[in-house]
Image (tube, coloured by chain):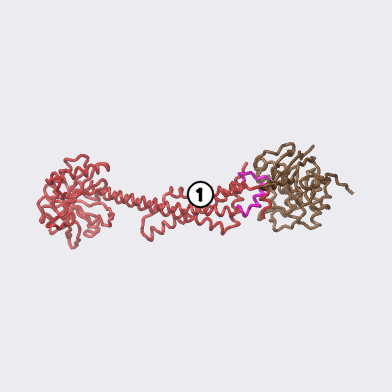
C-alpha cells in the first residue's frame, strides 16, 4: 500500500548555455503508509528538490509521481493547491507561521482554504493544538512563543486537515538539542499513534535515527536505502 | 470554494497593521472623491441658478432694439435712434407665425410719490402681454384691460420693491400714486422675481399702459408712436431662429430700408445668450470633473504602488498560504479586497469632505451648491472600481508567485 511512489523521477534546471543541473536524476522510490522515512545527504544532493516535488510545490521534469495513487504530473496550480491542502502537512525549519496572527488562526489556515465554517474550523484547530500540548496558548502570536512552541503550532497546522502525510524539512534545525528531542518524539508519536506517514529531511544522523528507514542522496541519486537498526 | 468573510477579515487586518501607510494611500482617493463631490455640487448649483434666472426672465424671448444714430460719421450707441413703433410690435404679432406675444415697451426713470413717501424707479409703458412674455405672476389685483390701453388710462401695476418702499405693509390696491406729478390708480401688484442675471433688481419696476407712457409721460422727446424696445415671445424654442429672420425682414420692409442699407434696429436672442452661459457652466463642470477624475486616477496608481509593496513584503506569507492550499483566486481576492477596502474607505472619507466643502463654499462664498445623490453614488462606485482595477495587477502578481521561492523569501 504505497502512499508515495516515484518512477524515474527527474528534475532538471537549465541555467542557460551548457549549464544543465540534474537536481534529481531518475529517482524511483516507494514509501508505504505509516512509514517514517529520513532523507539524508549533503547540500546540493537533491534532497530538498525531492521534498519540493513530493510536496507538490515543484514540477518534476520527467518520470512519474503518484501520491495516494494519483498522478500529480500535469496538474495546474489550483489542483496542486488542493492536493497540498488535503493530503499534505508541512513542517519547516523556519516554522513558517504567519506573523501577527494567533496560534489558533495559524492552525485554522488549511481549513480556511477548504471553506470550512468558522465554528468547525475553531473546533478542529483547538483539538490539534491540544494534541500538541498547547492548550492555553491559542491566543498567542508566534513572536510570543518559544521556538519549540512555534514548531508545535506548525505541527498542529500540519495535522489539522487529517492529512495522511507530513513532510518535515529540517524541523529541528533552529532548535536546541532538548527541544529537538521533544519535537522528534512528538513526530514519532504521531507516526505510531495515528500512523501518519512522515518524510523527514535532515543532515544530522541522530535526528535521522528517530526514523524507521533512511534514504541517502548524492548528486541527485539515491545511494542507499536501508531500515534503521533499532538498538 | 472561496471564503469571502474570512478573506475580508484578513485584508482588514493587513490594513490595520499599517495604519499610517493605509491612511496616506487613501489620501489620493479622498481628495479625488472630495473634489468630484464639490465640483459637481458647485456645477449643479450654478446650473440650477441659471435655469431659475432664465425662467424669471421669461423663455423663448427676442428683444428688438432700435439702431444707433449715425450723424456726420459719429455713431452713437445702440438704442439711440428712435425707429421702433407700437405699430411695429403689432405688425410682428399679426404677420409672423408662432408669435405668442409682441409687447412694445417705452420706459424711463421717474420719481413716484405716495403720501409722504417717494421712490425713484423705472416706469415702463407696456401692453398686458408683458405678463405672459416675461413670466410675471400677479400677487394681487389685475392687469390693465384693452380698454384701459386704448384710452390711455392712468392705472399702474407695482413691483414688490416699489410696493415695499411706498406702502410698507399697507394694501396699495385702489390707492393713488403720482408719477411725474400725474395721479395713477394702483390696480395690481407683481409677484416677487428677485435679481436678474446681471444683478438688477427686477422687482424695482412699475408697469403702465403703453398708450399712457407715450402720450402723457415719456412721449415728449420723440415722435408720437415711438417705443424703446419690443419684447417678442415665440411659441417654442425652435421658433426663435426663424422668427428672428422674419422680424428682421418685416421691419426692413416697414422701415423702407433698401437691401444695401444698414438696419436701424437689432434683434437680440436672449434665450440663446442664456443657453450659451448654461453651456459654459456645463463645460466648466465637465472640466472640473475631469480634473477630479485625474486625481482619482493618481490615487488609484498610489493604491497600486502600495499594494505592490505590500505583495513584496508579504511574499513569505503568500508562500505559506500557498503551501497549506490557498488557490489562485484565494490569493487574488485577498489583495483585491484589500485594495477595494482602501479605496472604498477613502471614497467614504472623500464624500464626507466633499459635503463639508460644498457647505463651506455655499456659506462663505455665497455660491449655491447642490449635492445630488447621484454624484455621491457615482463617486463611491467610481472609487470602488478604481480599487478593483488598480488592485488587480498586484493581486495577479501575488497569485503567480512560485511557492518555493515565496517560502524561501527573506
Q: Main secondary structure of the magenta part?
A: helix
Report in which chain the residue with disc 1 lies: B
In reply to whether residue B326 is colored magenta, the answer given is yes
- Residue B169's image quarter? bottom left
Name the residue rendered at 23%, 42% in the picture: B242
Question: Which residue is disc 1 drawn over?
Answer: B386
SS category of the residue bearing label 1: helix
In the image, taking residue B260 as reference, residue B315 lies left or right, namely: right
Q: Quadrant of the N terminus of chain B?
A: top right
The chain drawn red is chain what? Answer: B
Q: Which residues are magenta?
A: B311-330
Name the residue rendered at 59%, 55% in the picture: B309
The chain drawn brown is chain what? Answer: A
The residue closer to the viewer here, B87 or B280, is: B280
In the image, taking residue B355 as reference, residue B66 lies left or right, namely: left
Q: Position of residue B328 (x, y in %)?
A: 62, 44
Q: Position of residue B360 (x, y in %)?
A: 41, 59
Amino acid at each position: 500500500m504505497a502512499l508515495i511512489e516515484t518512477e524515474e523521477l527527474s528534475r532538471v534546471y537549465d541555467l542557460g548555455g551548457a549549464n544543465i543541473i540534474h537536481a534529481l536524476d531518475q529517482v524511483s522510490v516507494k514509501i508505504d503508509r505509516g512509514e517514517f522515512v529520513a532523507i539524508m545527504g549533503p547540500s546540493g544532493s537533491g534532497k530538498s528538490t525531492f521534498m519540493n516535488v513530493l510536496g507538490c510545490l515543484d514540477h518534476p521534469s520527467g518520470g512519474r509521481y503518484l501520491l495516494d495513487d494519483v498522478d500529480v504530473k500535469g496538474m495546474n496550480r489550483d489542483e496542486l493547491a488542493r492536493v497540498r491542502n488535503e493530503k499534505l502537512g508541512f513542517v519547516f525549519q523556519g516554522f513558517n507561521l504567519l506573523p501577527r496572527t494567533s496560534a489558533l488562526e495559524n492552525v485554522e489556515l488549511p481549513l480556511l482554504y477548504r471553506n470550512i465554517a468558522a465554528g468547525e474550523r475553531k473546533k478542529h484547530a483547538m483539538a490539534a493544538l491540544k494534541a500538541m500540548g498547547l492548550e492555553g496558548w491559542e491566543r498567542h502570536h508566534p513572536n510570543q512563543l518559544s521556538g519549540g512552541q512555534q514548531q508545535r503550532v506548525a505541527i498542529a497546522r500540519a495535522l489539522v486537515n487529517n492529512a495522511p502525510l507530513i513532510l518535515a524539512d529540517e524541523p529541528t534545525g533552529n532548535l536546541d538539542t532538548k527541544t529537538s528531542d521533544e519535537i522528534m518524539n512528538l513526530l514519532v508519536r504521531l507516526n505510531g499513534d495515528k500512523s501518519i506517514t512522515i518524510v523527514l529531511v535532515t543532515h544530522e544522523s541522530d535526528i535521522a535515527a528517530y526514523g524507521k528507514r533512511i534514504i541517502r542522496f548524492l548528486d541527485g541519486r539515491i545511494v542507499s536505502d536501508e531500515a534503521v537498526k533499532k538498538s | 470554494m472561496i471564503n469571502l468573510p474570512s478573506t475580508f477579515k484578513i485584508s482588514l487586518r493587513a490594513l490595520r497593521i499599517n495604519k499610517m501607510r493605509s491612511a496616506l494611500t487613501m489620501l489620493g482617493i479622498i481628495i479625488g472623491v472630495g473634489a468630484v463631490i464639490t465640483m459637481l455640487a458647485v456645477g449643479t448649483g450654478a446650473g440650477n441658478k441659471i435655469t431659475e434666472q432664465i425662467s424669471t426672465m421669461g423663455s423663448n424671448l427676442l428683444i428688438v432694439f432700435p439702431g444707433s444714430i449715425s450723424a456726420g460719421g459719429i455713431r452713437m450707441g445702440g438704442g439711440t435712434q428712435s425707429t421702433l413703433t407700437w405699430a411695429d410690435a403689432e405688425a410682428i404679432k399679426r404677420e409672423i407665425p408662432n408669435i405668442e406675444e409682441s409687447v412694445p415697451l417705452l420706459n424711463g426713470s421717474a420719481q413716484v410719490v405716495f403720501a409722504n413717501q417717494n421712490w425713484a424707479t423705472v416706469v415702463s409703458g407696456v401692453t398686458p402681454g408683458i405678463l405672459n412674455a416675461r413670466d410675471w405672476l400677479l400677487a394681487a389685483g389685475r392687469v390693465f384691460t384693452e380698454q384701459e390701453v386704448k384710452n390711455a388710462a392712468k392705472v399702474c401695476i407695482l413691483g414688490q420693491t416699489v410696493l415695499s418702499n411706498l406702502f410698507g405693509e399697507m394694501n396699495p390696491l385702489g390707492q393713488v400714486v403720482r408719477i411725474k406729478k400725474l395721479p395713477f390708480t394702483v390696480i395690481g401688484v407683481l409677484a416677487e422675481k428677485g435679481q436678474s442675471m446681471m444683478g438688477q433688481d427686477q422687482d424695482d419696476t412699475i408697469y403702465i399702459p403703453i398708450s399712457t407712457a407715450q402720450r402723457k409721460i415719456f412721449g415728449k422727446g420723440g415722435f408720437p408712436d415711438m417705443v424703446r424696445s419690443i419684447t417678442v415671445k415665440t411659441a417654442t424654442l425652435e421658433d426663435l431662429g426663424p422668427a428672428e429672420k422674419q422680424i428682421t425682414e418685416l421691419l426692413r420692409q416697414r422701415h423702407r430700408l433698401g437691401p444695401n442699407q444698414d438696419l436701424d434696429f437689432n434683434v437680440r436672442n436672449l434665450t440663446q445668450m442664456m443657453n450659451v452661459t448654461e453651456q459654459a457652466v456645463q463645460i466648466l463642470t465637465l472640466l472640473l470633473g475631469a480634473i477630479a477624475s485625474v486625481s482619482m486616477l493618481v490615487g488609484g496608481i498610489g493604491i497600486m504602488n502600495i499594494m505592490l509593496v505590500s505583495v513584496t513584503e508579504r511574499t513569505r506569507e503568500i508562500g505559506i498560504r500557498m503551501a497549506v492550499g490557498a488557490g489562485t483566486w484565494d490569493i487574488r481576492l485577498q489583495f483585491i479586497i484589500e485594495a477595494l477596502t482602501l479605496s472604498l474607505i477613502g471614497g467614504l472619507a472623500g464624500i464626507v469632505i466633499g459635503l463639508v466643502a460644498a457647505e463651506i463654499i455655499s456659506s462663505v462664498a455665497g455660491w449655491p451648491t447642490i449635492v445630488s445623490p447621484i454624484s455621491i453614488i457615482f463617486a463611491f462606485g467610481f472609487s470602488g472600481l478604481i480599487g478593483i482595477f488598480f488592485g488587480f495587477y498586484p493581486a495577479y502578481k501575488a497569485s503567480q508567485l512560485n511557492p518555493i521561492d515565496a517560502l524561501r523569501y527573506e
